Image (cartoon, rainbow, N blue to C red):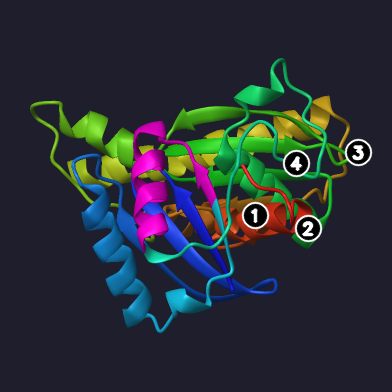
C-alpha cells in the first residue's frame, strides 16, 4: 500500500493507494505550530478511523509546497512506518518535459496535477487547481508542462474584502446570481464569478496562443472547485484529489528510487 501525503498551505491531504486505486483519504489542517508528535498522533488516529492500516504501508511519497512542514511530516511518518520514502523535487522524475525557465522551481503541487492529468486524460489540457491560490497549468500538445498562471485563491479574495471596514464577512455559496442585490451577494458574485471569468479568460488565451483544439479539456480540482463548476465551460472535467492521484503516478514512474 502506498501512503501519499500532499502538504499545502491550508490543508494536508493524505491518501492510501492499492495499485492506482485510492482506497482511503482524509485531510488535516496545515499548522506550523503543531509538533512532530502531534502530527504523528493525528495521522495515526485518522488512518485508524478511516480503516487504513499503517502496518500495510510499503511505500511513502510526499509532495509539499510548505518547506517548514515537510520535515515535521517526514519525522511524524517515520514514527509510524519504516517504509521507503520519496519526496517530490529536483532529482525525482515527473514523467513529462518541463518547459519553464528553471525546471527546479516547479512546485510539487503542479507536478502532481500535471502528472495525474496526463495519465488520466492525456494532452493537451489546461488545469485549474482551486486551493489557497488558484493555479493554472498548461500541458501542450507534446505533453510538456509549458507554464501557467497563479491567481489569488477564493479564500484569499474573501479574506481581503473582509478587511474593509464596511464590508461584511460572507461564506461562499454554491449558486450566486450575476448581479448582487445586497452587499453579501455582491461580494460572492464578485469573488466566485470573477474567479470563473478569470479562469475562462486564461483558458481561451492559452488555447488561442498555443493553437489548441476547441475541445481541449479544462481540468479542475481543489477545495473550492465545486463553487466554480456552474460558471465554467461544459467540457470542464472535475477531478477531486487530483494532486494526490498525481503523487501516486509520480511514485509509479520512480519506483525503486528514493529521495
Q: Residue at x 59, y 27 (%)?
A: 149
75 inside magenta stretch: yes
Mark 4 falls on what kind of element?
loop
Q: CA distance from mark 1 to mark 3?
A: 19 Å
Q: Residues within 10 Å of mark 3 (few under 14, many from 20)?
A: few
Mark 3 falls on what kind of element?
loop
Q: 154 or 175: nearer the eye?
A: 154
How many numbered discs, if any?
4
Range drawn in magenta = 62-79
Q: CA distance from mark 1 to mark 2?
A: 8 Å
Q: Earlier in the sequence, mark 4 or mark 2?
A: 4
Left or right: 120, with 137 as reference point? right
Q: Residues within 10 Å of mark 1 (few under 14, many from 20)?
A: many
In the picture of the structure, the residue carrying the numbered disc 4 is 93
Image position, residue 196 (x, y; %) = 51, 43
80 is higher (above) or lower (below) than 225 = below
Left or right: 226, with 44 as reference point? right
* Front disc: 4 or 3: 4
In the picture of the structure, the residue carrying the numbered disc 1 is 246
Q: Quadrant of residue 153?
A: top left
Q: Is residue 35 visible?
A: yes
In the picture of the structure, the residue carrying the numbered disc 3 is 142
Q: Which mark is residue 119?
A: 2
Quadrant including the N terminus: bottom right
225 is higher (above) or lower (below) than 48 = above
Q: Residue at x 35, y 33 (%)?
A: 68
Amino acid at each position: 500500500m502506498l501512503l501519499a501525503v500532499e502538504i499545502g498551505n491550508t490543508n494536508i491531504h493524505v491518501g492510501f493507494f492499492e495499485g492506482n486505486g485510492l482506497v482511503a483519504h482524509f485531510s488535516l489542517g496545515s499548522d506550523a505550530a503543531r509538533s512532530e508528535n502531534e502530527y504523528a498522533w493525528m495521522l495515526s488516529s485518522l488512518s485508524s478511523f478511516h480503516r487504513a492500516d499503517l502496518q500495510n504501508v510499503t511505500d511513502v511519497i510526499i509532495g509539499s509546497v510548505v518547506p517548514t512542514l515537510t520535515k515535521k511530516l517526514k519525522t511524524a511518518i517515520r514514527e509510524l512506518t519504516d517504509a521507503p520514502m520519496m519526496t517530490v523535487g529536483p532529482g525525482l522524475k515527473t514523467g513529462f518535459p518541463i518547459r519553464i525557465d528553471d525546471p527546479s522551481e516547479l512546485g510539487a503541487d503542479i507536478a502532481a496535477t500535471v502528472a495525474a492529468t496526463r495519465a488520466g486524460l492525456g494532452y493537451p489540457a489546461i488545469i485549474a487547481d482551486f486551493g489557497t491560490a488558484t493555479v493554472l497549468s498548461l500541458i501542450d500538445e507534446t505533453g510538456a508542462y509549458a507554464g501557467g498562471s497563479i491567481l489569488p485563491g477564493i479564500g484569499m479574495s474573501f479574506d481581503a474584502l473582509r478587511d474593509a471596514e464596511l464590508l461584511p464577512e460572507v461564506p461562499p455559496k454554491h449558486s450566486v446570481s450575476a448581479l448582487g442585490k445586497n452587499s453579501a451577494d455582491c461580494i460572492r458574485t464578485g469573488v466566485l464569478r470573477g474567479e470563473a471569468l478569470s479562469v475562462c479568460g486564461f483558458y481561451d488565451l492559452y488555447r488561442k496562443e498555443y493553437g489548441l483544439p476547441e475541445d481541449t479539456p479544462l481540468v479542475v480540482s481543489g477545495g473550492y472547485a465545486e463553487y466554480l463548476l456552474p460558471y465554467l465551460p461544459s467540457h470542464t472535467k472535475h477531478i477531486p484529489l487530483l494532486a494526490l492521484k498525481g503523487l501516486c503516478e509520480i511514485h509509479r514512474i520512480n519506483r525503486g528510487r528514493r529521495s
